[in-house]
Amino acid sequence: MFKVRVVGKNDEKEARLSEEELQGFVSKFVIDQAKTMGHAKTTILQGKESYHWHLQYLPQGDDKDCQS
């Protein structure tokens, strides 16, 4: 599971995505880098807009939102 923050010129969004869901947006290299280093950044160009993707790898069982 990955925590993803996408920053555009006028907006910013956060989501949690699985590796399979991410594959439609970023390269396998970026996904592997996030898994190895714990985080990664990349820029996606879409038309005249650019979006900065900040990925944080969340290993299985490391869900900080569910602390008891």
Image (spheres, rainbow, N blue to C red):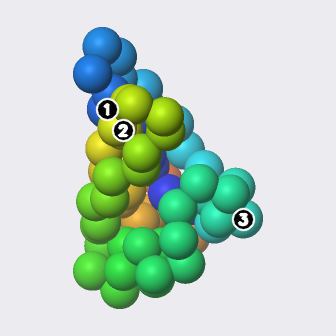
Q: Nearer the viewer, mark 2 or mark 3?
A: 2
Q: Residue 10's quadrant in the figure?
A: top left
As measured in the structure, the alpha-carbon distance from the residue carrying label 2 to the one carrying label 3 is 20 Å
As measured in the structure, the alpha-carbon distance from the residue carrying label 1 to the one carrying label 2 is 6 Å
Contact between marks 1 and 2 (CB within 8 A): the answer is yes
- Callout 3: 10 Å neighbours few (<14), some, many (20+)? few
Q: Residue furthest front?
A: 48
Q: Amino acid at mark 2?
A: Tyr
Q: Residue 20's quadrant in the figure?
A: bottom right
- Callout 1: 10 Å neighbours few (<14), some, many (20+)? some
Reply above or below: 17 against 6.
Answer: below
Secondary element type, mark 3: helix
Dot label at residue 61 = none
Residue 33: give x, y in percent of width and height: 36, 80
Task: Please give the name of the residue rendered at 27% of the width and 80% of the height, measured from the top-left corner.
Answer: 37
Is residue 35 visible in this depiction of the protein?
A: no
Q: Which residue is mark 3?
A: 20
As measured in the structure, the alpha-carbon distance from the residue carrying label 1 to the one carrying label 3 is 21 Å
Task: Please give the name of the residue rendered at 33% of the width and 52% of the height, measured from the top-left corner.
Answer: 43
Of callouts 2 and 3, the N-terminal one: 3
Q: Which residue is mark 2?
A: 51
Q: Which residue is mark 1?
A: 7
Task: Please give the name of the residue rendered at 52% of the width and 62% of the height, measured from the top-left corner.
Answer: 26
Q: Nearer the viewer, mark 1 or mark 2?
A: 2
Q: Amino acid at mark 3?
A: Glu
Q: Amino acid at mark 1?
A: Val
Contact between marks 2 and 3 (CB within 8 A): the answer is no
Residue 44: give x, y in percent of width and height: 41, 49
Reply above or below: 61 against 25.
Answer: below
